[in-house]
Amino acid sequence: MKQFEEFGRVMAVLLGLKRDGRFAEFEELIRNTSLKYTGAEIDYMASVENDQLIEVLTDQHKLNDEQLKMAGDLLYEQAETHLHAGRSAEACTCYQKSLLIYEFLQSQSTLPYSLDVHYKVKLLREMLTS
C-alpha cells in the first residue's frame, strides 16, 4: 500500500512536469519510475508484442496487479509525451499497451474497482478505433 501511495505522489510530479512543458524531465522521471516500481524499462514494455504483453509482464517480470496498474499509467503518460513530440506511431503503441493492461485489470484484477481505469479504457477505446 505504501508503494502505491508513493507512486501516486510521483504521478502528481509527472503531471506537474507535463503541465509546465518540461518534457525532458518528464521522460526521465517516467524511465526511472518504471524501473523502480515495475522492474521493467518503459521502452521494453512498449516494444513487446501486444499478444504477449500481459504474459511477459505477469510471468516473466512477475508484476502483481498494483504494478500492472502502474505500468499502464506510465505507458499512458509516455504516450502523451510521444504525442507532444510529434511521434504519433509511438504514442499509438503506448496507448495500445496501456489499454491492454487496463482491460486485463478490469477482467482479472484483485484490485478494487477503479473509476480511473474505467474512464481510461473508455477514452482509449474511442481514440484507438477512430
Image (cartoon, rainbow, N blue to C red):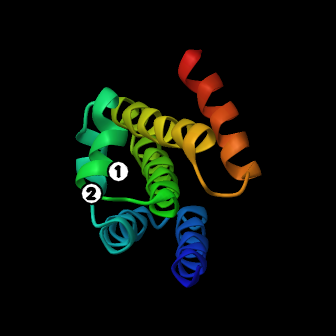
* Circles 1, 2 touching at the beta carbon (< 8 Å): yes
Q: CA distance from mark 1 to mark 2?
A: 6 Å
Q: Is residue 111 left or right of residue 75?
A: right
**Which x, y percent locates residue 129?**
57, 16
| Helix, strand or loop for disc 2 | loop
Identified by mark 1, the residue type is Thr
Taking the spot 73% from the left edge, 51% from the top edge, the residue there is: 113
Quadrant location, the N terminus: bottom right
Taking the spot 52% from the left edge, 56% from the top edge, the residue there is: 69
Q: Is residue 58 left or right of residue 3?
A: left
Q: Considering depth in this image, is 20 or 113 the residue closer to the camera?
A: 113
**Which x, y percent locates residue 5?**
61, 79
Within-10-Å neighbours for mark 1: few <14, some 14–19, many 20+: some
Taking the spot 32% from the left edge, 27% from the top edge, the residue there is: 51
Q: Quadrant of residue 16?
A: bottom right
Residue that label 2 marks: 61
Q: Is residue 1 above or below residue 120?
A: below
**Which x, y percent locates residue 49?**
26, 31
Q: Considering depth in this image, is 114 or 116 the residue closer to the camera?
A: 114
Q: Is residue 23 above or below residue 98?
A: below
Q: Considering depth in this image, is 114 or 97 the residue closer to the camera?
A: 114
| Helix, strand or loop for disc 1 | helix
